[in-house]
Each structure stands twice: as structure tokens, then as C-alpha cells.
Amino acid sequence: MSHTKAGGSTRNGRDSSGRRLGVKLFGGQTAQTGDILIRQRGSKFEAGPLTFMGKDYTIHAAEAGTVSFREVRKTGFAGTKARKTVVYIEPFAA
């Protein structure tokens, strides 16, 4: 009988944690000023009215209101057309 453990186990066991990306507040939910709406890598979603995008592409609410999403057709530099989802805030009625 063998007196050593099975080989290869020292190369296993490494995996990074999830980055918790995605939509944090969905359409119809209320957002306060500065709330994170979407965490993303790259600009999959674009920042619309009353929102702003941070340097890591995180979209925040610039004012309090209701979150909404809209699909728009964008024309690229080379004339290619693509659909983009824009997130925006509808302010509360004053």
C-alpha cells in the first residue's frame, strides 16, 4: 500500500471571489442622491439624465427620483449602429 497522499492537490484551490457586478436598483425603484444604480465593467449601460458614471464605469444617481431604463440606437464613429441601454432618473414631482 502507498504511504503518500495522491499527488496534484497542491495545484488546486485557487479561485477569485465574485465582483458583485450588475444592476443594483431596477426600473421603478426609488434612488437617493449618490446611490449606486449599476456596477459594470465597460459601458454596457450608459448614464442618462440625472445620472453620472464613475471612473470604474459605475453609474450613480445625481438626484433623488425613480429609476428608469430606455433602449436607444447609437451611431458609432464608423457609422455602425448599435443598441444601448440608457439608465436615467425621473425626479420626484415637487
Image (spheres, rainbow, N blue to C red):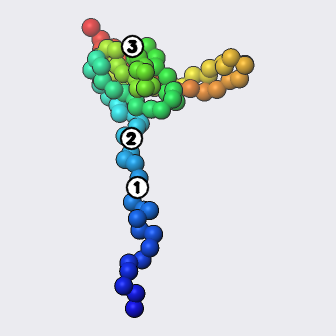
**Is disc 1 in contact with disc 2, using a CB cutoff of under 8 Å?**
no
> Which callout, 3 or 2, points to the residue nearer the camera?
2
Please say if 11 is above or below 28: below
Which residue has dot 3 on it? Answer: 50
Q: Residues within 10 Å of mark 3 (few under 14, many from 20)?
A: some
Which residue has dot 2 on it? Answer: 19
Which is more toward the observer, 4 or 54? Answer: 4
For the N terminus, which image quadrant? bottom left
Which is more toward the observer, 53 or 68? Answer: 53
Question: What type is the residue that disc 3 sits on?
Answer: Leu
> Which callout, 1 or 3, points to the residue nearer the camera?
1
- Apparent side of residue 63 relative to residue 57 in the rendered image (left or right): left
Position in image of residue 22 (x %, y %): 41, 36
Q: Earlier in the sequence, mark 3 or mark 2?
A: 2
> From this viewpoint, is residue 26 visible?
no
Disc 1 element:
loop
**Is disc 1 in contact with disc 3, using a CB cutoff of under 8 Å?**
no
Which residue has dot 1 on it? Answer: 14
Gap between marks 1 and 2, in whole Å? 16 Å
Question: What type is the residue that disc 1 sits on?
Answer: Arg
The image quarter containing residue 13 is: bottom left
For the C terminus, which image quadrant? top left
User: Residue at point 42% right, 77% down?
Assistant: 6
User: Residue at point 40% right, 87% down?
Assistant: 2
The numbered dot on residue 36 is none
Q: Earlier in the sequence, mark 1 or mark 2?
A: 1
